[in-house]
Image (cartoon, rainbow, N blue to C red):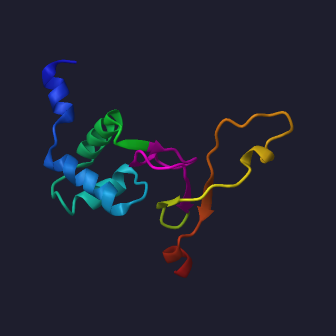
Amino acid sequence: MTGKEDAAQTRDTSQRRAIRAAFLKADRPLDPPQVLELAQHEKSGLGIATVYRNIKMLLEEGWLTPVELPGANTHYEVAGKAHHHHFHCRGCGKVYELMACLPHVQDLAPRGFRVTGHEVTLYGDCSKCAAA
């Protein structure tokens, strides 16, 4: 990578600040269209291509981490959080963090198996969708 390309990736632009602010304000995993919607409040004229480009750079910097959900767009969240799981609302599509973990996950595996990691996603309706 040239010095110019490296500088472009680490440059703090108003678009990047708006995208970071969207993640911090939401405090939950977001997919790119959700990032665009929230970041446009801080930076009008922001486009989806700019959101995708900045998400890629924020992933490379280690500021974001992907959240993969079966049957859904990849969501992203601020990196460095403690181990946690997610709740995916079937009504509005939003993803929320669950700051708890199942106890004794190893006990769920068949005898003789060794668990080396796990992901748990709960599905249902968030409080707003459940009330509607």
Q: Position of residue 28 (x, y in %)?
A: 42, 58
| Magenta stretch contains residue 114 | no
Q: Position of residue 132 (x, y in %)?
A: 52, 81
Give the farthest residue toward the bottom: 131
Q: Residue at x 74, y 50 (%)?
A: 104
- Quarter of the rendering occupied by the N terminus: top left
Most foreground residue, 72 or 102: 102
Q: Residue at x 34, y 42 (%)?
A: 63
**Residue 79 can be seen, yes or no:** yes
Quarter assignment of residue 66: top left
Give the farthest residue toward the top: 2
Most foreground residue, 60 or 124: 60
Please state the extent of the stretch shown in magenta in the rendering: 66-89
Most foreground residue, 83 or 66: 83
**Residue 37 can be seen, yes or no:** no
Horizontal arrangement in the rendering, residue 131 relative to residue 108 (left or right): left
Q: Taking 71 as reference, is 27 above or below it?
A: below
Q: Position of residue 81 (x, y in %)?
A: 45, 49
Q: Taking 128 as reference, is 54 above or below it?
A: above
Q: Residue at x 43, y 54 (%)?
A: 29
Horizontal arrangement in the rendering, residue 29 relative to residue 118 (left or right): left
Q: Taking 37 as reference, is 69 above or below it?
A: above
| Magenta stretch contains residue 72 | yes
